[in-house]
Amino acid sequence: MDKIKEVIAGFIFWVYSKIFGGTPGTRAKNFLKDLTFVFTALSLSKFFSVFIQVYIGRSLGADEYGKFALIISVSHLLYVPMLFGIGTAMVRYLAPEENDIERKKIFSSGIFSILLFTSFFSIIFYSTAGFFANLISISPRYFHAAIVMAIAYTFWVLSQKISQGLNEMRKLSAINVLWGISTAIFVVIFIDHFQGARPPVYAFIIGYVLSASIIIPEFRKNLIISFSRDYVKSLLRFSSFIVLGIFSVSVTENINKILINFFMSLEDVGIYQAYYFSTFSLVGFFVTTISMVFFPEASRHHDKKEFFLKVKMFLLKSPALFPALLLISFVILKLYGPGYPLKFLLLILFVYGSLQFFVYSLLTWFAVSIGENGAKIFTMTILIISTIMIILSFYLVQHFGIYGAVISLIFSYLIGTIFLFKKIKEELFRE
């Protein structure tokens, strides 16, 4: 294990020197050490994630896998108002805070606010389950499963945000590794003993709960009964700028699956999910790994202009990743088996779209690290992306199927990235 970490650390330091130029300074070395640790853990987690998705896809077949993917998509939409962006706001305010008492106030204010939002929206969604199920053409029992999954996912995401804000990178890494191991175990057990799309959903829920429990010691250490009204206002003000953006992110990630189910079939949803996971989730792995350390680091970095120029240099060289992404995506897709036909043009389009997503995502995390103005920029950008995507997908999915879905992804992220880059530059370099 230590040898693997040494190899990964050497690779990351080499990439830094090639992209940013020169030897990393003290701050950069600490940043890269954190990144190395997280990357090692998330590599293990991603290995289990690939196994989980491929195992579910091969075991259930495209039709049932489509149902499973649809439940996941709905849960990722429902979790947004439950967390309400407060987790990201906690990272923003916890990361630079060095006073222990103030940290506890921020921590407690955030936790109590999240409990309130999660409870409120859980009741709302459960009481209106029939309406929403009919609206998106999903079975009410699947919608109920999605609600439970959304609650578990909310606290799993929160556990990671707390780890980021408190700079507990070992806990952050352990959360992801334990999720991968526990979920893989329960997926195999449940699929072997039960039929249908819901058993793997329950395996995911158990994995979220078990892995999120790693953060419990931080609750004991930082949670206090009284909380600051000023910090609640600050957290909610920051989160209010980005929650609409986070919801729009969830829409852009899941709207195509919902529309494919509406206009086509669950089997097509399953095939779309296989292509999407083989490409976007691979890039998402790198984005998640970098952003988990990058966002707190960028928030602490006072010279945002210098940091932005380094990020720009890195992103300009990102197209060089395309051949490697195409090869790895091809291998993952083939693992799904003959029930998921390989269409090379479709795969190329998905890989290109995922690379566009990579560039956009890192720019997004940098924008949010600027503060409230950055959060506003992020919200404007993702609203543009989600609006374009909904309009395009509604038309293109009807006429071109899965090809139309991925084309809408590419075009939407391209427009959004151009707009985001322009706005960040205006914010940092205005006179």
Image (spheres, helix red, strand yellow):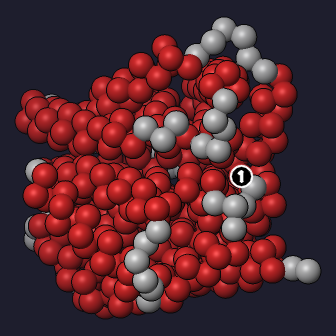
**Dot 1: what SS?**
helix
Residue 285 left/right relative to 87 = left
Work out whether 78 lies above or below 321: above
x then y, percent, for residue 26: 46, 62
Work out whether 294 lies above or below 303: above
The quarter of the displayed image where residue 116 is located: top right
x then y, percent, for residue 431: 91, 80
Of residues 317 and 100, which is closer to you in this image? 100
Of residues 64 and 224, which is closer to you in this image? 224
Q: Residue at x 65, y 76 (%)?
A: 306
Q: Is residue 88 visible?
A: yes
Q: Which residue is mark 1?
A: 242
x then y, percent, for residue 303: 69, 68
x then y, percent, for residue 166: 52, 36
Q: Amino acid at mark 1?
A: Ile
Q: Residue at x 44, y 30 (%)?
A: 152
Seen from this angle, which residue lies furthest right? 431
Of residues 28 and 298, which is closer to you in this image? 28
Work out whether 426 lies above or below 80: below
Q: Residue at x 20, y 83 (%)?
A: 327
